[in-house]
Image (cartoon, rainbow, N blue to C red):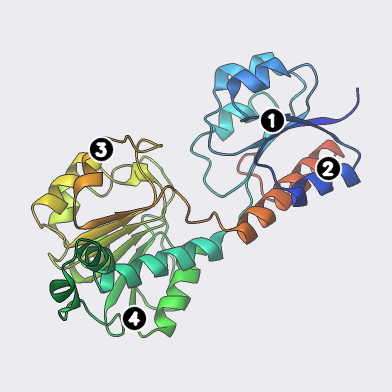
Amino acid sequence: MPKAVLIPQSFTETGRKVFRDADIQMIEVPAVNNDALLHYADQIQGAIVMLDPISNETYPHTPNLKILARVGVGYNNIDPQGAAQHGIWVTITPKANYNSVAEAILGGILLASRDMYQRNQLLINGNWSKGHAPAGHDIAGQSLGIIGYGRIGHALATKAAALGMNILVNNGSHHKEPEIGTAVSLDDLLANSDYVSLSAPVTTETTEMMNRNTFSKMKPTASLINFGRGQLVNHNDLIDALKNNTIHSAVLDAFQQEPLPVNDELLSLPNVFLTPHIGGGTTDAINRGCQDAASEVVRVLSGNQPLWPVNQL
């Protein structure tokens, strides 16, 4: 059987070149999802996965599938252990976009620090005087709480500290001593941070960790920055916290439901800035991710171990 891999239309030329060089056929589909995997099950040994959920019920019908290579670091759309039970590797691309996400978070902090979104709206609405009035804070001397100290958290700490911010870190039950900043309890982080940034994985421990209780522990002047996963935040509790001024503002790139519904109440709040899950979506990061994901497929289909698996066979 010739080697073949399922790829989404958005897969970049950097990744396609890896497959061409390895003489692996590419089957392009609009999105790599359960239906596409089932439709091409008799032809493919690998697939490139973006954000579409992949069901464990698909695997018994894809007996030739050896690897699902995720472009990105989050894999809550796949059950790695369920895949492993059917002899399928699940891999990620941890070096592709961590810097891009850290830069996006830093941009969110800068935006929130000066109420840039609100000032933009005042200007657009013709209220120059109110928009021009002094407001906001320098970020130098402010405290940034980072929840989740992986590659993104580490890169963010380095960048924010270089701008004079105080860094507080909490890595949940998996304690890490940060190279920059101070490891603290979650309660201490929430109570002392001017900005709380989420970069933790979605687990039983972290699902909806930001909720009515944790928002009440934050400073009323603090901002929530979420360029991680929407499942880390209780959506309705966040809306209440923003409406009731329990916290000052939020900058959000990830949501419990994506795409964000057009009638979602977040869209009408004046103290929240929203982007459509683009934190790691620079051209540079996507090119790196596609190249690294393709390389993982080539390794596995050549009979070798992947470099970045999130399960074990």
Decide which of tag 1 and tag 3 comes sooner along the chain: 1
Q: Nearer the viewer, mark 2 or mark 3?
A: 3
Decide which of tag 1 and tag 4 comes sooner along the chain: 1
Residue 88, disc: 1
Q: Is residue 23 left or right of residue 63?
A: right
Q: Is residue 234 above or below residue 79?
A: below
Q: Nearer the viewer, mark 1 or mark 3?
A: 3
Q: Is residue 295 left or right of residue 72?
A: right
Q: Residues under labels 1 and 4: Cα distance?
A: 43 Å
Indicate the secondary structure of the residue bearing disc 1: loop
Residue position marked by numbered label 2 in the rendering: 19
Q: Identify residue type, mark 4.
A: Met
* Residue furthest to the left: 244
Q: Quadrant of the N terminus?
A: top right
Residue 264, disc: 3
Q: Residue at x 40, y 81 (%)?
A: 161
